[in-house]
Image (cartoon, rainbow, N blue to C red):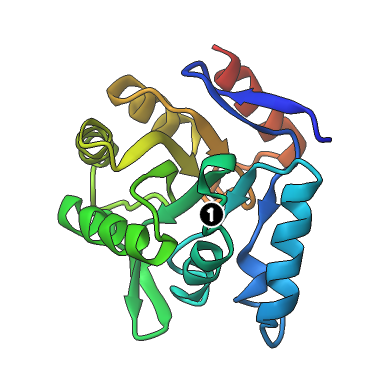
Amino acid sequence: MLQKRKLGRQGLEVSAIGLGCMGMSHAYGVPNGAESAATIDRAIELGCTFFDTAEVYGPYTNEELLGRCLQGKRDQVVIATKFGFALDGKAPCGTNSRPAHIREVVEASLRRLRTDRIDLLYQHRVDPQVPIEDVAGTVRDLIAEGKVLYFGLSEAGEATIRRAHAALELTAQEVDVLDEITASQPVSGARYDDRLLALLDE
């Protein structure tokens, strides 16, 4: 069985290896529902409790897939999903983290995931048009309503992380691409990761 790890300081415990489900519905060829379901089942058998999705994967179909596959197993797992993109039909067309939009996305994600709560809700991309404090405030309200349990950021820079955490304690920070590092602030990935890890340890 997989080891467990705590994310953040609020008590969220997940398997040390999680399953990112994006490729089951998005970006990597023709989706295979039966194969995806078998993969999710096998991951649970092996002790994986952490499953990651987002409304933009598909879009929408990845959350629907995970919702179907986790029926009867919901209390065994932690579900992470994300908001933050504007969608034009099936294509992202910029960011959107307006408070009203966050609420719309969360309600739709809950329906697709067939659950009453999202364990970990990430902002998928920083929206330069919406102060991160407004984003955190909206997520705080959703936590108070029981629809979300923990808050995370994806691909945010150090300044954004600090401001978000000051407004609402962060549980997780996802890093794939260093979106907030510009040509005027050249930083190698390794050095950035070191700084980010030091920040998250504070």
Local SS, label 1:
loop
Which residue is most to the top? 202
Image quarter (top left, top right, bottom left or bottom right) of the C terminus = top right
Q: Is residue 159 visible?
A: yes
Instruction: Locate residue 7: give its quadrant.
Output: top right
Residue 5 versus residue 45 in the image, above or below: above
Picture residue at 64% right of the left edge, 62% below the top: 21
131 or 116, which lies in front?
Answer: 116
Residue occupied by mark 1: 72
Residue 11 in percent (x, y) is at 51, 19
Residue 20 versus residue 139 in the image, above or below: below
Instruction: Locate residue 107: give its quadrant.
Output: bottom left
Q: How many marks?
A: 1
Left or right for 112, reference 157: left
Q: Is residue 124 visible?
A: no
125 or 10, which lies in front?
Answer: 10
Residue 123 in percent (x, y) is at 40, 48
Left or right for 87, reference 137: right
Residue 19 versus residue 2 in the image, above or below: below
Picture residue at 48% right of the left edge, 60% below the top: 54
Residue 26 in percent (x, y) is at 60, 76
What amino acid type should be assigned to the residue bearing mark 1? Answer: Gly
Left or right for 36, reference 90: right
Picture residue at 71% right of the left edge, 78% below the top: 34
Residue 166 in percent (x, y) is at 32, 20
Instruction: Locate residue 83: give its quadrant.
Output: bottom left
Q: Residues within 10 Å of mark 1 (few under 14, many from 20)?
A: few
Picture residue at 54% right of the left edge, 70% below the top: 65
